[in-house]
Image (cartoon, rainbow, N blue to C red):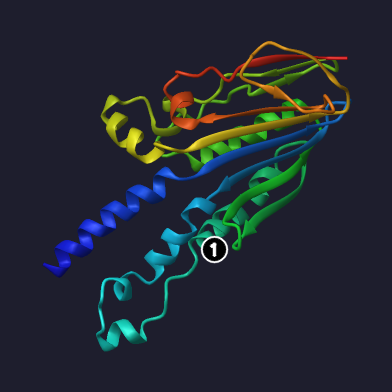
Amino acid sequence: MRRFLLLFCFCILTGCLYSCFEIKENIRINENGSGTYSFLMDLSQMRALFGMSRDFKRSMGDTSARARNSAPMNNPLIQMKAKFDGLQSTLEAVPGITNYKTVCDTTNYIIGATYSFATIESLNKSINVLRNSNTTGGTTTDMIHYAYDNKHFEKVNDISKANVTGSSSKNDSLTTELFRGSRYTLTCTFDKKIKEVSNPLYFISADGKTLLYTGSLLDIMNQKTNIGSTVILH
């Protein structure tokens, strides 16, 4: 019975962990097309659940000597950090990518990477490397994610179920459970003020220089929401 309860609670816990996170893409584009980019996973909503999982046996009333003396599990962000650290040499091998740094905030549960790019082409290539390294059976084809030509900026509708989990319909139920409640947020900041935005789902900051989108990641993956947008700058 104890084993059954442990398994049951673990399944519930795992489902919760996978459903409460936010993917954040942040881009700063200079007038000449260079800039900085960050890809972050905000896992702050999981903080309490991670704490439970690291001391799971004790929380289930296991008072054995083995449970009392066992060391708590490491913070899961430390394991994720190792993966992002390993991407540095691969990403900096992309022409135009420099200043790579892993972001690992164990207090606020944020993990990811930040780096500089010389051109929008180098940014697109770097995002392909980053995404291909984190897919679970998704596509590995090179894609264009952004375009920029001084006064025009474009965000491509580049996130789909096929890109993340593969195109097989066998993944539909699992995908829904894993990504239910997850969110995607994009911020793009420019030197010039924004004149027009084609997609009404995007918001413009008070100073007119930052573009913001936030919404359901699952809806984007299922193509219920189109995150593509064309921006005209002054």
Q: To which residue does mark 1 refer? A: 78
**Picture quarter with the N terminus:** bottom left
Image x and y of residue 191, in percent: 88, 28
| Residue found 45% across the figure and 18% down from its top | 224
116 versus 228 height, above or below: below
Please tell me whether mark 1 sits on a helix, a strand or a loop.
helix
**As rendered, which of 6 and 77 lies closer to the eye?**
6
| Residue found 70% across the figure and 38% down from its top | 94
Query: In the picture, residue 40 is in which quadrant?
Result: top right
On screen, residue 217 versus residue 57, left or right, reads right
**As rendered, which of 128 and 164 lies closer to the eye?**
164
On screen, residue 180 versus residue 78, left or right, reads left
135 versus 17 height, above or below: above
Can I make out residue 34 in this image? yes
| Residue found 50% across the figure and 19% down from its top | 225
Residue that lies at the very extreme toward the front in this rendered image: 206
| Residue found 66% across the figure and 54% down from its top | 103
Image x and y of residue 190, in percent: 83, 28
**Picture quarter with the C terminus:** top right
Residue that lies at the very extreme toward the left in this rendered image: 1
Disc 1 residue type?
Ile
On screen, residue 29 versus residue 146, left or right, reads right
Image x and y of residue 193, in percent: 86, 21
Q: Residues within 10 Å of mark 1 (few under 14, many from 20)?
A: few
60 versus 77 height, above or below: below
